Amino acid sequence: MMALSCKDGKGAILDNGKYVRYTPEQVEALERLYHECPKPSSIRRQQLIRECPILSNIEPKQIKVWFQNRRCREKQRKEASRLQSVNRKLTAMNKLLMEENDRLQKQVSHLVYENGCFRQHTQNATLATKDTSCESVVTSGQHHLTPQHPPRDASPAGLLSIAEETLTEFLSKATGTAVEWVQMPGMKPGPDSIGIVAISHGCTGVAARACGLVGLEPTRVAEILKDRPTWFRECRTVDVLDVLPTANGGTIELLYMQLYAPTTLATARDFWLLRYTSVTEDGSLVVCERSLSNTQNGPSIPPVPNFVRAEMLPSGYLIRPCEGGGSIIHIVDHMNLEAWSVPEVLRPLYESSTVLAQKTTMMALRQLRQIAQEVSQSSTPNWGRRPAALRALSQRLSRGFNEAVNGFTDEGWSLMGTDGMDDVTILVNSSPEKLMGLNLSFSNGYPSVNTSVMCAKASMLLQNVPPALLLRFLREHRSEWADNNVDAYSAAAIKLGPCSLPGSRAGNFGGQIILPLAHTIEHEELLEVIKLEGVSHCPEDALMARDMFLLQLCSGMDENAVGMCSELVFAPIDASFADDAPLLPSGFRIIPLDFCKVRSSLNASSPSRTLDLASALEVRGPGNKTSGDRSVSSGNARSVMTIAFEFAFESHMQESVAAMARQYVHSIISSVQRVASALSPSHLNPNGGIQAPLGTPEAHTLARWISHSYRCYLGVELLKVPGEGSESILKSLWHQSDAILCCSLKALPVFTFSNQAGLDMLETTLVALQDIGLEKILDEHGRKSLCSEFPQIMQQGFACLQGGICVSSMGRPVSYERAVAWKVLNEEDNAHCICFMFVNWSFV
């Protein structure tokens, strides 16, 4: 036996040259050092030995082994914790699926019974061949009678009766067969899914139901869900007008709720509600709601101007404690949104259970999951209050945009005189302190905003353009629609100074600097800071130009989400970027109206859509129109875009600012129409194939050059072309699974072409591709490797690069197994560009 010891018996003991036994004091010291630096370098380990005398008699190699073992144990602990979490989710999901299976079996039995009754009734009707005219008259009259219910008693006793009735009806929807539920398209249950989501079929109004597991206790879940304005973006306010305790320990609340209108073409909704909170016999917490209508002997809310009174049928939340912590929650939303009161083109928004599920039911689950994740990560260093603060910022942006779109008089908005012929509406608010988030004594004692705020807004119908694709273009190509002079005016209006964001880490993106702030779970919502370099309100004075920063919120960027609204909302931010900084949000909201058609068009063939988009935008010259004049059949998918821009101004400049705002929104509408026309997939083959010819002649020629040059330099074929001709080559190149990108031969190379895999890897479009430089996507190792191999590429014609990491335009790391670069030659054998192929790439 070999033993290594130090004085006082506090040294480590080495058994048989294999195992080292450390004293408790040494373990404590090593653990403390591990938390400071889990993976110390060789120099750092030697420094640790010198700084900590208790470790002086331990070999540096043994300390290295200890840290390796410690990291391994930490990894095993995290994996065990993850597996336990997955196991709990699977157990809870299994319970939910069993309950869903029982409900479906009951529904099947009920349908079988109804089918038998219907058959019996049909047989009886067939046997009854004769009927008296008197009986026929009586029967006919009964079918046209409309039952008139007497007013319900709204006294405390009457309200308790209504509450108990609401509870029974809600539970029959949440766990019973009161509503026929069908699975929402695209929703698949699993341990990582948001939950089991279903929509109604054939019931009054629109209804959606969701079941899910969240890592929060039932009382916390109820507290979050009751605070509807914090997670339901369309909820303007919920006022609790009265609270009545019940004998069973529950509470009855009388609520008045207002919902924003999503577009300028509709009117806002309001509700007069009863909310009943109670605990069931099995310990589940229930929060249920319904509208109070046709009541007497109690409080009521008369009709409110500029609002349409909608109806909430029995809805609510059933929250069950889950073994091992957390809660199993059932959510039911059931409403009658009075679709008759909106233009016919907008009625799908008010008659679709899918829309209700997306913006209300699923949003509640997402909020719960987001907060649960924040709670679980609250112990992470430097986590602090950041998530809550960022959520508050995104809520302020969304709320401010909704206020601008709706323009309520109680917030100080008034309509500016108009002849009624202009499609751009101008509103003026002379009391901006009423608006959300404005603090007039904000910046060093100087007023942060001017005396008034103006809003220019409009809505337009879009034909056959995917909202998510249009939104991404607007986000990535601000220069295509924005005016720097207007941006500078907006910045100057809030006294924007030189901006330095403390504690931020920014990255380059398309000539702008983007600071990602927050990204919600399973929901394409991104809060970011945009830097616009060198904008000036005085173009003739370049010395006055300075950087401008925007706080920007993007949501609805998933093309596969059925019925999802897409938004791009932004506001100039002050230099200090404080929590109470004034925000004047502006932006775009795109709402699909024919979601089923949108989805089918997206599935038709997205590659040709993107490729032809590049062709349509590249061939246009100054003053030339794209395909905006082509007719679109009525069967194409439609969406409505709402545009709203806010400007702070001095009162004496009202007329000039109004003229500027109206002209600016008109120019934006024109730009959006041009872009939407280019993005429209109306040129797609109805069978999902690619029509001929695909793209421009230049695209076919480039594809032929890429394939020919690869074969010449590497001696093998790049593509498996099924047919002959440049069209087949381009089609095969476009569908190649490896990312292929062409780069210009310039001092600062930029991408000029990519296949679909390359666009997916960089998370961009062909048009946006031209704003991305080669150096922006490569890490330091990749740049060094490319620099060393570039002479070989130019002399030998190709080079093989080792695998590594690159970065997409959204800032996400992408790994690739290897890369091949080759020189693309034109017809005269001159170098046209450099082509890169990234093999077996995937997001990290």
Image (tube, rainbow, N blue to C red):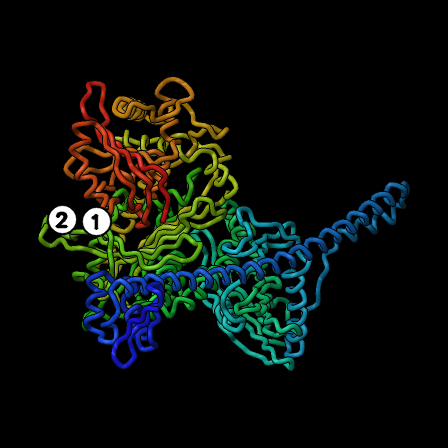
- Residue 804 rendering spot, x and y as whole percentages: 29, 44
Question: Viewer-proximal residue, 199 or 162?
Answer: 199
Would you place residue 586 above or below residue 432 in this image? above
- Residue 650 rendering spot, x and y as whole percentages: 22, 62
Res 651 visible: no
Would you place residue 231 above or below residue 633 in this image? below
**Is residue 131 rendered to the left or right of residue 540?**
right
- Residue 840 rendering spot, x and y as whole percentages: 36, 39
Quick one: quadrant of the N terminus? bottom left
Secondary structure at numbered mark 2: loop
Q: Residue 484, labelled with which disc?
A: 1
- Dot 1: within a 10 Å radius of its alpha carbon, few (fewer than 14), some, or many (20 or more) residues? some
Question: Viewer-proximal residue, 408 or 656?
Answer: 408
Would you place residue 660 above or below residue 222 in this image? above
- Dot 2: within a 10 Å radius of its alpha carbon, few (fewer than 14), some, or many (20 or more) residues? few
Question: Viewer-proximal residue, 452 or 840?
Answer: 840
**Is residue 706 rendered to the left or right of residue 540?**
right
Residue drawn 52% across and 75% down? 241
Q: Residue 539, labelled with which disc?
A: 2
**Is residue 131 rendered to the left or right of residue 433?**
right
In the image as oriented, which residue stretches furthest toward the front?
1
Precedes in sequence: disc 2 or disc 1 = 1
Question: Viewer-proximal residue, 48 or 660?
Answer: 48
| Residue type beneath disc 1 | Asn
Discs 2, 1 touching: Cβ within 8 Å = yes
